[in-house]
């Protein structure tokens, strides 16, 4: 749920400066670090993230034709240079149905209510418009609480042709408004039909799954972006749960997307093994993200991590197609981290 500010250093710069390693746990730490250093130095991290998303998309659509893919905080992946001057990456664009971007107007640098600097905002806007020109729906999440900023966020995003959600809390743990912006009773069959969305992936404020589902059913949001589980993996949203959410309170159809962190491993997931704190697998960087408790960066190009996310019956994407979600909202996190780390 973080956002990409700049594109850090290019691979050439990484080859010069990116050889310093953090010490890994385990008896073979030194060997692992040497191996990781060699591997990372040779990797095109942006292309590997494209490949990851393209493979995930192909698998998901094989399981469920029409399964929607929205990638968050990954606007540079759309072109060869990461901006509108580059050549469109057709394979990647064909693999996604929409793009998500945080903090376009407010909440910059993980500071709620902070106004995004003009230069950063304009860079986001150029790429979001690029996405629109290529038929991809643009979803914007701003973080602010001041009334004038909330109103400005919705108005500005609407004027750009984006759909948006203003979160009043960074944790995305409550419904920020009872009445969605641009609410309507029409059916939402595709992302292009949507006029608003709700982003709620941390339901710890709800006392039970029943309460959580009932509050969602009572809303009129066109798109729901939800974690596929109620608080932890032991309480998945079932097929019946998901189907019950696909009708708005006013009777119109809506879309339900499952949030999937593909750039982070989370220590509250079923796949997590506590032994990894002392002996992590090759794909895991056990240094905890300072901004998000219980979250750890992953070497997302490694097959063992991909296997957790998609490609088999135990994977998250397979669980979500089985549960009847309409698509997945992919949090790529800050994949450029690896351009400056080993």
Image (cartoon, rainbow, N blue to C red):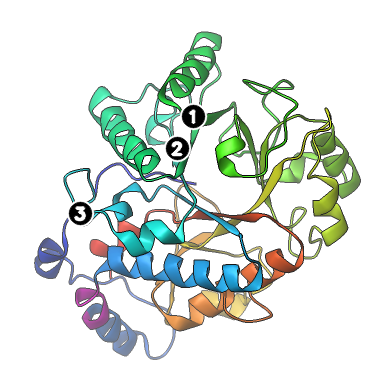
Mark earlier in primary sequence (2, 3): 3
Question: Closer to the camera, 35 or 12?
Answer: 12
Question: Closer to the camera, 222 or 146?
Answer: 222
Q: How crowded is mark 3: few (under 14 residues within 10 Å), some or many (20 or more)?
A: few
- The residues bearing labels 2 and 3 have C-alpha atoms spaced at a distance of 24 Å
Is residue 288 depicted above or below 42 in this figure?
above
Q: Mark 3 points at which residue?
A: 87
Q: Kindly indicate the quadrant of the structure image that contains residue 104.
A: top left
Asked whether the residues under the numbered discs 2 and 1 touch, taking CB atoms below 8 Å apart as contact, a structural biologist would say yes
Rendered location of residue 182, percent (x, y):
62, 20
Q: Kindly indicate the quadrant of the structure image that contains residue 327.
A: bottom right
In the picture as drawn, the residue positioned furthest to the right comes out as 210
Q: Residue 328 carries which label?
A: none
- The residues bearing labels 2 and 1 have C-alpha atoms spaced at a distance of 6 Å
Mark earlier in primary sequence (3, 1): 3
Rendered location of residue 38, percent (x, y):
22, 82
Q: Name the residue under label 1.
A: 142
Rendered location of residue 341, percent (x, y):
27, 65
Instruction: Look at the image and give the residue range highlighted in magenta.
Output: 38-43
Q: Which mark is residue 102?
A: 2
Mark earlier in primary sequence (2, 1): 2
Question: Closer to the camera, 193 or 51?
Answer: 193
- The residues bearing labels 3 and 1 have C-alpha atoms spaced at a distance of 29 Å
Asked whether the residues under the numbered discs 3 and 1 touch, taking CB atoms below 8 Å apart as contact, a structural biologist would say no
């Amino acid at each position: 749920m973080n956002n990409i500010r700049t594109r850090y250093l290019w691979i050439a710069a990484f080859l010069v400066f990116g050889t310093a390693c953090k010490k890994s746990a385990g008896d073979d730490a030194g060997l692992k670090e040497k191996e990781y250093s060699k591997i990372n130095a040779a990797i095109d991290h942006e292309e590997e993230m494209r490949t990851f998303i393209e493979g995930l998309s192909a698998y998901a659509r094989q399981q469920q034709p029409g399964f929607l893919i929205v990638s968050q905080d990954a606007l540079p992946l759309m072109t060869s240079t990461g901006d509108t001057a580059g050549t469109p990456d057709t394979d990647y664009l064909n693999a996604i149905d929409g793009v998500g971007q945080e903090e376009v107007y407010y909440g910059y640098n993980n500071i709620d209510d902070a106004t995004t600097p003009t230069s950063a905002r304009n860079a986001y806007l150029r790429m979001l418009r690029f996405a629109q020109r290529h038929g991809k729906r643009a979803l914007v999440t701003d973080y602010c609480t001041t009334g004038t900023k909330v109103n400005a966020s919705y108005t500005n995003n609407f004027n750009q042709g984006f759909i948006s959600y203003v979160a009043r809390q960074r944790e995305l743990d409550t419904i920020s408004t009872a009445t969605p912006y641009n609410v309507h009773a029409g059916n939402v069959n595709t992302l292009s039909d949507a006029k608003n969305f709700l982003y709620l992936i941390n339901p710890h404020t709800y006392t039970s799954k029943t309460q959580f589902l009932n509050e969602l059913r009572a809303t009129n949001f066109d798109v729901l972006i939800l974690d596929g589980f109620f608080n932890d993996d032991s309480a998945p949203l079932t097929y019946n749960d998901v189907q019950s959410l696909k009708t708005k309170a006013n009777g119109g159809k809506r879309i339900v997307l499952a949030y999937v962190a593909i750039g982070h491993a989370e220590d509250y997931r079923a796949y997590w093994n506590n032994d990894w704190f002392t002996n992590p697998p090759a794909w895991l960087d056990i240094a905890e993200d300072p901004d998000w408790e219980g979250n750890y960066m992953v070497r997302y190009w490694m097959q063992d991590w991909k296997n957790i996310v998609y490609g088999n019956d135990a994977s998250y994407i397979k669980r979500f197609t089985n549960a009847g979600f309409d698509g997945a909202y992919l949090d790529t996190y800050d994949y450029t981290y690896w351009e400056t780390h080993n």
